[in-house]
Amino acid sequence: MSHRRRALATAAALLTLTAAGACSTQPDPSTDRTRSTVSSAAPGTKTGTGEVRTDLEPLTKRFSALGQPVSATWMSGTLGGDAPGPSTYWIDAVVEVTPETAATLRAAAPQPTAGTPEVEDGVRSAVPSGRLLTSKALDALFAQGSFRATAYLAADSDTVVLVALGQ
């Protein structure tokens, strides 16, 4: 009987060690729901109602760098489907700001970009056709709360384009 108990104890110990060795102390990014997915390259498909909005308060509440905008065309929704856990929200916006606000934003030393903002179709027609300026410092002005944005400032007008994600 003593031999049998020792064998069972050894088997249990080996099973415990094998199970512990298979575990990782680092979370798997594809399954860890506690990590933030908010980044400029967040995975997922934009979903939403398709409604094109023009109200300003939801934008100014999230992005104080807009000051008191003149007008806006924007859409929003969530990324991905019905996955459990916190939702990641997206906002695509084209905002006409006051000349004073535009001057403040230009002080962030944005540089011309060849890139085009990746915005939804309902907002795309409002994106200025001229040259756009961007910089990390300009983006930082629109990092507020959980939201982060890639910001573009029109070179020839007082228009800001935001491609934002937040929780």
Image: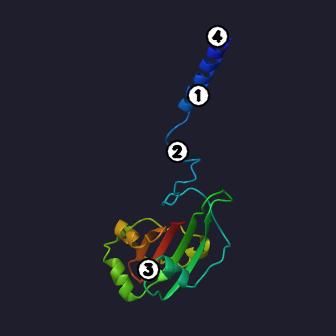
| Kind of residue sitting beneath label 1 | Thr
Which residue lies under the disc numbered 3?
Answer: 64
Q: Which mark is residue 16?
A: 1
Disc 2 marks a residue whose amino acid type is Pro
Give the class, few, some or many, for how many residues have Cα within 10 Å of label 1's Cα (few <14, many ≥20): few
Pick whichever of labels 2 and 1 is earlier in the sequence: 1
Q: Which of the labelled discs sits on residue 27, or is there none?
A: 2
Q: Nearer the viewer, mark 2 or mark 4?
A: 4
N-terminal of the pair, mark 4 or mark 1, is: 4
Which numbered disc flags the more N-terminal residue, 1 or 3? 1
Residue type at tag 4: His
Query: Is the N terminus in the top left, top right, bottom left or bottom right quadrant?
Result: top right
**What kind of element bears circle 4?**
helix
Kindly identify the residue that appears in the image at 47 percent across and 70 percent down.
145
Image point 59% across, 75% down: which residue?
75
What x and y, as percent, mark residue 136? 36, 66
**Above or below 8: residue 35:** below
Query: What is the distance, in whole Å, between disc 4 and disc 1 at their CAs?
Result: 20 Å
- Taking the spot 64% from the left edge, 12% from the top edge, the residue there is 2
Residue 106 position, x and y percent, is 33, 78
Viewer-nearest of labels 4 and 3? 4
Residue under label 4, please give it.
3
